């Protein structure tokens, strides 16, 4: 397993989907995980695999903060240690379920399967702004690698073709020059960002009432996390975080968390807008070959407006990421 992603934090579920005394199965990096919340409200993330014969523990039961396997009834307490073997009550209790690091942030459950290389999930300071409303979109399951999905999120030249009439206009396809820099910031974390990106958008957001020139800032703060902020004329402020859950090298669940000051549109309308955009991107993403992002120089032809995509590829190389990429 690629250590860069193994030691990073990834979103796996909505926090509010797991109540006290409930469990939920999730997939991450070819690993099955069972999430469960104990009677005190504390969340646990374990490998969803009984150490006896490999059965999914999430198919069993959870009572009194104890998970019981559905196959032979072995029980496991809060620390993942076996507490009971019904067929052999006096046997030594040595079995231990693999226990993972888990956090709740931005309304999502985050899991790190390895040794955390970061103190927590990626920085998304707009989420803490109480002047901005929060809306969760997705998850969307995509047959593509995480890096291809991030790169699509950073790409403006496709707006006029894939999102015509919403984010782009075929009469205005030119992408003006923009600035790409690496950054290291106490609030935003570190990574690479593109600033002063301009695009004409017929309907930049659910609340937009007509076309306007939009200024974008994109920032990549982890290999599978990108955040864009829009600064349209007028009063709507919007930050959109693309947060990826890598299932395998070429299948990914996509979570989108929006922080915005549109207090008029309903949650359903805002989600429907994002659904429309993402479902337009999905067939393009799933058609790309290879599904893994090629980092080899010359493997794909780039032009000046792909500068942010190239900066992202450089960032992945510098991070030494191998999962979901071809070198
Ligand atoms: Fe879980 Fe046997 S497989 S108790």
Image (cartoon, rainbow, N blue to C red):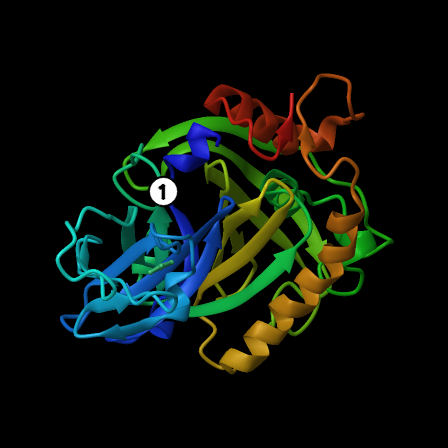
Foreground of the two, 12 or 212: 12
Image position of 124 (left or right of 164): left
| Residue 314 image offset from top left, x and y in percent | 57, 22
State which image quarter holds ligand 1.
Answer: bottom left
Q: Residue at x 79, y 55 (%)?
A: 162
Can residue 168 be seen here? The reply is no
Q: Residue at x 68, y 63 (%)?
A: 277
Relative to 232, residue 64 above or below:
below
| Residue 291 image offset from top left, x and y in percent | 72, 39
Q: Which residue is disc 1 drawn over?
A: 113
Relative to 184, residue 61 above or below:
below
Q: How many marks?
A: 1
- Local packing at callout 1 (Cα closer than 10 Å; few below 14, some 14-19, many 20+) is many
| Residue 199 image offset from top left, x and y in percent | 69, 49
Image position of 294 (left or right of 11): right
Q: Residue at x 71, y 54 (%)?
A: 200
Q: Residue at x 78, y 56 (%)?
A: 283
In the picture as drawn, the residue positioned furthest to the top comes out as 297
| Residue 137 image offset from top left, x and y in percent | 53, 67
């Amino acid at each position: 397993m690629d250590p860069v992603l193994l030691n990073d934090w990834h979103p796996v579920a909505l926090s509010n989907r797991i109540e006290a005394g409930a469990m939920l199965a999730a997939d991450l990096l070819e690993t099955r995980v069972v999430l469960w919340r104990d009677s005190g409200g504390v969340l646990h993330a374990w490998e969803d695999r009984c150490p006896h014969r490999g059965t999914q523990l999430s198919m069993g039961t959870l009572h009194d903060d104890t998970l019981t396997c559905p196959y032979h009834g072995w029980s496991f307490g809060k620390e993942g240690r076996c507490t009971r073997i019904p067929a052999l009550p006096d046997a030594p209790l040595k079995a231990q379920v693999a226990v993972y690091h888990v956090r709740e942030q931005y309304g999502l459950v985050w899991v790190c399967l390895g040794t955390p290389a970061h103190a927590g999930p990626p920085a998304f300071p707009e989420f803490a702004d109480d002047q901005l409303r929060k809306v969760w979109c997705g998850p969307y399951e995509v047959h593509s690698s995480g890096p291809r999905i991030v790169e699509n999120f950073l790409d403006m030249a496709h707006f006029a073709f894939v999102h015509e009439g919403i984010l782009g206009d075929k009469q205005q396809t030119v992408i003006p020059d923009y600035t790409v820099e690496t950054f290291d910031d106490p609030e935003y974390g570190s990574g690479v960002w593109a600033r002063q990106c301009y695009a004409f958008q017929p309907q930049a957001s659910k609340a937009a009432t007509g076309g306007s020139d939009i200024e974008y800032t994109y920032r990549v703060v982890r290999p599978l996390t990108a955040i864009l902020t829009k600064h349209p004329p007028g009063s709507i402020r919007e930050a959109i975080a693309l947060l990826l859950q890598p299932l395998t090298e070429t299948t990914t669940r996509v979570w989108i968390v929006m922080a915005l000051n549109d207090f008029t549109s309903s949650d359903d309308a805002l989600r429907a807008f994002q659904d429309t955009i993402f479902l337009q991107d999905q067939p393009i993403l799933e058609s790309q070959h290879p599904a893994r992002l090629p980092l080899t120089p010359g493997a794909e032809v780039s032009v000046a407006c792909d500068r942010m995509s190239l900066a992202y590829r450089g960032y992945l190389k510098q991070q030494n990421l191998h999962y979901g990429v071809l070198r």
